[in-house]
Amino acid sequence: MPRQSAMVLGTVCVIALQATAAAGSFVEDSKLKIINKNFFFHRDFRNGSSSATGTNAFKPASERNGYAQEWAQGFLLDYQSGYTPGLLGLGVDASAGLGLKLDGGGGTAGLRLVPIDSDGKPGDVYSRIGGALKLRASKSTLKYGEQMPMTPVLAVNTVRLFPSAATGLQLNVNEFEDFAFEAGHYTKQTGVDSSNSGDKLTTDYALRRGDTAITYDSASFVGGRYQNGSLSFALYAGQLEDAWHQYYANTKYTFTIDPGRRLGFDFNIYRTLDYGRSLAGPINNTSWSLSTAYTTGAHTFSLTHQQINGDEPLDWIAFGTMGGTITIGNAVQYATFTEANERSWQLRYDYDFAAQGIPGLSFMARYVRGDNMDNSHSNNPYYTARHIYDTDKDNKHWERNFDIRYVIQSGPAKDMSFRLRQSTHRATSGYRYLDIDEIRIITEFPINVF
């Protein structure tokens, strides 16, 4: 292991050991976890498409690889202290990660498990470290430093070797039984494949001026959730400085038919409007999804409709090379079905093998189909620079996903998980995304040190 990486991992251990020298609940409530994660990712570009990332970016299209493939091993240390005694408790959180490339060259790089240098070649090893100070009063906390916000208007990405992260201030108020409130202000970010925690925020569509990505100085949000039994509501307002105001609402309801059957509803809606200097151009977008799920025994059948209303796509905050997470029904493994004026449907099936005496084993299959993409009337020069849809074509696409996961339930390897994810995406020639077949194999083993 390189000396620098060893020092990074050792730093968190030192913090944890120093914390144990203190007294009170600061030590007693401390937690240290080591997460071992192995990630194999293969994406095959179909129907004449090829990879444009890694060293392929420097080659003519005819010489580029027709697939991308990466395999990496990650070690993530996560330390969370308790709080010092008293009316105001002080604590600290810290994390460190080490990523190792197991396979993948410049011609197959670009899946964002490991960073790529300016020549398009993947690094053999990379590391990261972060920390935050926290203050607790009663059941509420105020935290400053590197964090992983997970809100509908600002949320990190968790589907690569390491999660992305953001640096800033966040308040969480949990004084009420049914209601939780949170607010945050973030100014820096760390990408999923980056060691740098000082980069500025971007957007999922990575709007560009020339060859330079547009970056933003800060992102803020305020919102809360209310839940009473089977009914819940959420309201959030977010701001990307001098780019947009984004508003979100959600309601969920579960109706229990009998002990073995239930019916669930999940409605999400976003409203995004440009403001200030409108650095991302003019935006006027309303996007929503409605999901209905019927569960009987171990089976769950779901149907989702999603609609994008606006000549600009639904966009959201990104962390370097990848977007964050968006809370809308048809944002699935490869495509998000969020193009301008797009409408889409999803059919999904889930099965819990606990009913067959295999607790921890689950299966999911879904099919999503989208059409009606049209941004030909948009006045936004940055979105249309990426792609303009030809309205004379029948623009449509579909994606199919399979996901099987097993979590060991007991014994020395308790909580170790194995996951296989497969995706197929096909589209007409006028759609923005490529045709692909991909497989992801993920093994994760969390170890609770204390």
Image (spheres, rainbow, N blue to C red):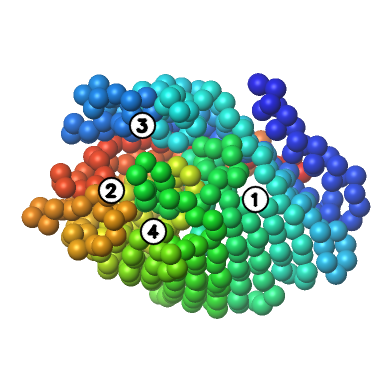
Asked whether the beta carbons under mark 1 and mark 2 sit within 8 Å of each other, the answer is no
Say which element carries label 3. loop
Mark 1 or mark 3: name the one nearer the start of the chain.
Answer: 3
Dot 2 surroundings within 10 Å: few (below 14), some, or many (20 or more)?
few
At label 3, which amino acid type do we have?
A: Thr
- Tag nearer the camera, 4 or 1: 4
Position of residue 237 measured from the top left corner of the image (x, y, whole percent): 49, 71
Q: Disc 3 versus disc 4: distance between alpha carbons?
A: 24 Å
Mark 3 or mark 4: name the one nearer the start of the chain.
Answer: 3
Q: Disc 4 versus disc 1: distance between alpha carbons?
A: 26 Å
Query: Quarter of the image holding residue 228?
Result: bottom right
Mark 1 or mark 2: name the one nearer the start of the chain.
Answer: 1
- Tag nearer the camera, 3 or 4: 4
Q: Disc 2 versus disc 4: distance between alpha carbons?
A: 13 Å
Q: Which mark is on residue 280?
A: 4
- Tag nearer the camera, 2 or 4: 4
At label 4, which amino acid type do we have?
A: Ala
Say which element carries label 1. strand
Q: Disc 1 versus disc 3: distance between alpha carbons?
A: 29 Å
Residue that badge 1 annotates: 146
Foreground of the two, 117 or 109: 117
Say which element carries label 4. loop
Task: State the residue at coordinates (66%, 66%).
Answer: 171
- The quadrant of the rendering that contains the C terminus is top right
Residue that badge 3 annotates: 53
Foreground of the two, 358 or 89: 89
